[in-house]
Amino acid sequence: MSDDPIFALATPWAESPVAVIRVSGNACIGKLEVLIPEIQTFKPRTLNLTKIKSLEGEVLDQSLVAIFTAPASYTGEDMVEIFPHGNPLIITKIFENFRKIGMRDAQPGEFSKRAFLNGKIDLTQAEALSFYITAKSEAGLKLARQGYFGSLSSAISHLKDRLIEVLAFTEAHIDFTEEDIGNFDYDYVTAAVETVKDEITRMIKNYKIAKIALSGLRVCLVGLPNAGKSSILNLLVGKERAIVSEIPGTTRDYLEDRLIIDGFEVLLYDMAGFRETGDPIEKKGLELARKLLSECDLVLLVHDITLPLEASLRLAADIKREVPVWLILNKMDLNPNFTLPNNGAENGLFEKVLYICALEEKSRNVLIGAMREKLIQKQDVDISSSVINERQSHILSEVIVFLDRFIDVIHKEPLDVACDLLRNALWKIDELTGRTYPDDILSKIFQRFCIGK
Ligand SMILES: Nc1nc2c(ncn2[C@@H]2O[C@H](COP(=O)(O)OP(=O)(O)OP(=O)(O)O)[C@@H](O)[C@H]2O)c(=O)[nH]1
Ligand SMILES: [Mg+2]
């Protein structure tokens, strides 16, 4: 049953002055009457101070309770919100009694899933909601808020309208004779589809930036053994986080720590130095390092300037090119006059070259200053109505494929072939908002939510 009464704690399981319990489902208000005797007398959407009892009649708590009647609630079903005192023992007791009267614990994301199924929010809003709670920067919060309050949905619906116009216009000409079709306005049709394509491209392009705003900037420290990666991690986080030693191969597992720069979260990963190794543990560490590298947003390639640059350059060439790489020339204290012939940028491998000494506090400012610059650039880009996750980005790139094919065939093939491509594009767009959706996708999306959402 998809509307059976469910319940969950919407606040963390911890001692607090007040907690919030959510209940949703068919006839849940009536069901609760045995535990909250006065509940049927409450006016919807008002707060009522009342007693919560056990089935045996013992008073478990006195708290505020609000009822919402379908469809005017978050899930679109009958709902009850209870604000008990936030002692986990009280909540546990209340929940025991909820189970006894035939209600069950909600699964992660189940409230939002019901809101979606009842047409209260679309999929892009549901997805934005989970970021709204977890966004790691002001920019991310703003983006998630816009998404949740429907700005991506309305941008999408605007694009859809444009494509529907083109489809209607083109369909209207399908049955025309050769002569009439001479009047078919190819320019209008192509230009309209191009505009939609440009807008979608922008939405996808900004995804990379949106991702940083929502999830933080992930930075990998990479280099040969002993280059000073762990020393840099320690310098950045301002504590002895990683073991540093003059023995190459000190770090084998990877370490993660974080710092906040201008409200943006920066996640730092220190990892094993790259080298050929027979040590199975180090090998495993390098495997993990490669995986992290493929997922990060920025690579700091640390080079010990007392050693030849070639080996580090080979490593740089080896790293996936989509990720910007900064060359960090470390141990400058050992040769303060060291410079790269052409500042190292001429080969196009590096976005930036920085000269530092990981043992000196002032190098911290050099590194943080450079990252701050990068983050500020990101903040300036308009990411409103950007897509916010891989699913959305992937769907939109599929839409673009259909639109490209449309532009390609419109002059060459009968109009109904072009119309089919447009219909496919529209169908894909509906997957974004969830108007068309495969069931397995739905459960995947909502499973990522935490319980109570
Ligand atoms: N003189 C000098 N020594 C440094 C500097 N940075 C790091 N070192 C030293 O270099 C050695 C290696 O430093 P680590 O930070 O452990 O190097 P790593 O890249 O993490 O090494 P692995 O974990 O083995 O891959 C240590 O003895 C550090 O004290 C620096 O800027 N100047
Ligand atoms: Mg190390």
Image: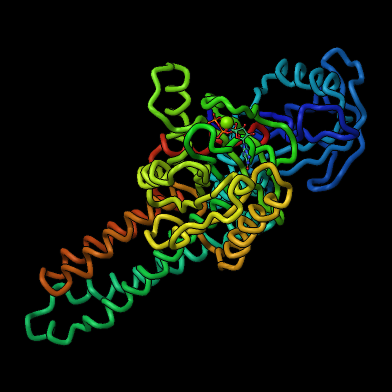
Note whether 67 is above or below 251 in the view shown: below
Image location of residue 98, percent across then percent down: 74, 21
Asked if one can make out residue 382 in the rendered structure from this viewpoint, the answer is: yes
Seen at 58% across and 60% down, the residue is 374
The front one of 355 and 6 is: 355
Scheme of colours in the image: rainbow
Seen at 91% across and 28% down, the residue is 51
The front one of 344 and 374 is: 344
Image location of residue 292, percent across then percent down: 48, 36
Quadrant of picture, ligand 2: top right
Image location of residue 434, percent across then percent down: 45, 49
Residue 358's image quarter? Answer: top right
Note whether 221 is above or below 155 in the view shown: above
Seen at 60% across and 68% down, the residue is 380
Asked if one can make out residue 437 in the rendered structure from this viewpoint, the answer is: no
Residue 95's image quarter? Answer: top right
The front one of 207 and 94 is: 207
Q: On the rendered structure, is 243 left or right of 62?
A: left
Seen at 36% across and 47% down, the residue is 317
Query: Which quarter of the rendering shows the C terminus?
Result: top right
Seen as rendered, the residue at the extreme left is 178
| Count of all numbered marks drawn on residues in the image | 0
Image location of residue 272, percent across then percent down: 51, 30
Note whether 237 is above or below 252 in the view shown: below
The front one of 198 and 326 is: 326
Residue 195's image quarter? Answer: bottom left
Q: On the rendered structure, is 305 left or right of 280?
A: right
Q: On the rendered structure, is 266 left or right of 154?
A: right
